[in-house]
Image (spheres, rainbow, N blue to C red):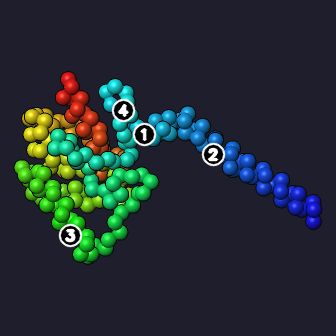
Amino acid sequence: MGRELRAVGVFLAVMTVLLGLGYPLAVQGLGQLLFPDQAHGSLIRDGEGRPVGSALIGQAFGEARYFHSRPSVVRYDGAGSGASNLAPGSKDLVTILEQRLQALRSANPHAPEPVPADLVTASASGLDPHISPAAALWQVPRVARARALPEKQVREVIAEVQEGPTLGVFGQPRVNVLKLNLALDALARS
């Protein structure tokens, strides 16, 4: 019996060190070596090299001169990722969507109808950093007026930062809102 307990204890100690220390350190080391940018959070830096956000986590932009992200139920808090979980037929959801539509139309009086769905609906994670190209183009009149730029020039910046489907086949074309706003800020500085 004592011999068996000793074997179990040794096995437990070896596996604890191996899986609790060795494996995590090996994975972290490989991540740092093979994917250093991603291992540090896919940070996006401004023109001076300061981190201003992550390419993977959205953030709120409220000023008229900035493109706005999708709504977030969790206020872009990565620790509290999630959706509202309201049913499609919920009166509360309908009320929330109507309020969002009204706010969007009020802030974008020169934008065409219809309002793109991704500007009204939150993503499942509440952290989505992207909007559709249609959602970006819909906001062009407001952003162009606020920045005193021709709409054509703002559309060109959207086209420059637009990303295609992952590996060319997964997902839809998309625009990272932070990258778009930083590109517009860089344009203003030049």
The reply to whether discs 1 and 3 touch (Cβ–Cβ < 8 Å) is no
Q: Is residue 27 visible?
A: yes
Spatial separation of the CA atoms under disc 4 and disc 3: 38 Å
Q: Residues within 10 Å of mark 3 (few under 14, many from 20)?
A: few
Q: Is residue 173 visible?
A: no
Q: CA distance from mark 1 to mark 3?
A: 36 Å
Left or right, 145 with reference to 32: left
How many other residues sit within 10 Å of disc 4, few (<14), some (14-19) or many (≥20)? some
Calculate the distance from the C-alpha at mark 1 to the C-alpha at mark 4.
Answer: 10 Å
Mark 2 or 4: in front is 4
Marked residue nearer the N-terminal end (2 or 4): 2
Q: Which mark is residue 42?
A: 1
Q: Quadrant of residue 8?
A: bottom right
Q: Decide which of tag 2 and tag 3 comes sooner along the chain.
A: 2
In the image, which disc is placed on residue 24? 2
Which of marks 3 and 4 precedes in the sequence? 4
Q: Check if mark 1's residue and mark 4's residue have beta carbons within 8 Å.
A: no
Mark 1 packing: few (<14 Cα in 10 Å), some, or many (20+)? some
**Three-letter amino acid code at disc 3?**
Thr
Tell me which label, 1 or 3, sits earlier in the chain.
Answer: 1
Q: Which mark is residue 78?
A: none
> Which residue is depicted at the point 42% across and 52% down?
78
Mark 3 = which residue? 95
Residue 124 picture quarter: bottom left
Residue type beneath disc 2: Pro
Q: CA distance from mark 2 to mark 4?
A: 28 Å
Q: Secondary structure at mark 4?
A: strand
Mark 2 closeness class: few <14, some 14–19, many ≥20 residues within 10 Å: few
